[in-house]
Amino acid sequence: MPTTLEGIPLSEHARIRMAQRGLRDAAVLAAIDYGRRIRSRGTWFHVIGRRDVARARRLGVDLSDHEGVHVLLGEDGSVITAYRNKNLDTRPHGRRRNRARRVY
């Protein structure tokens, strides 16, 4: 697998994870080209959700095989990692740190 994907830099981590997860170059490029962009956790997420598949279908592009693909791009535009997850919630999970503690 190349270290660039049609001119987009690909980290070693991303290359390894794509191979491990069976994500093809076409899925990553589709997420970058047609997926929605979400800024979260200091990085850009490009994700293909159900609505993105429907929107692309109206444009004549079939993204049904790529639904749930997430691609994380760094500040320099390089692919950090890629994975498939149908849950599009990119917010951090767990307890909130600034939550007031209850005193009994």
Image: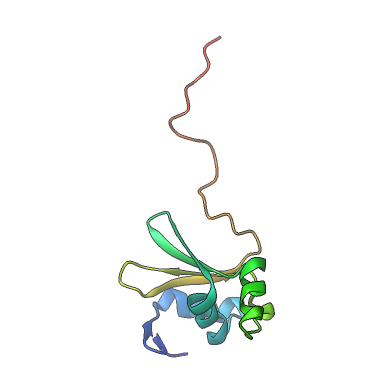
Point 61% across, 82% down: residue: 59
Q: Which is more toward the observer, 75 or 50?
A: 50
Q: Is residue 83 left or right of residue 77?
A: right
User: Residue 49 vs residue 41: left or right?
Assistant: right
Asked if 43 appears above or below 58 in the picture, the reply is above
Q: Is residue 32 above or below residue 6?
A: above
- Residue 64's image quarter? bottom right
The residue at the point 67 percent across, 73 percent down is 54
Residue at x 56%, y 9% (from the top left corner): 104
Name the foreground residue: 99 vs 17.
Answer: 99
Q: Is residue 49 above or below residue 62?
A: above
The x and y percentages for residue 72 are 45, 68
Count of numbered circles in the view: 0
Question: Which residue is painted at 47% across and 80% down in the image?
Answer: 15
**Residue 50's quadrant in the figure?**
bottom right
**Where is residue 60, by image quadrant?**
bottom right
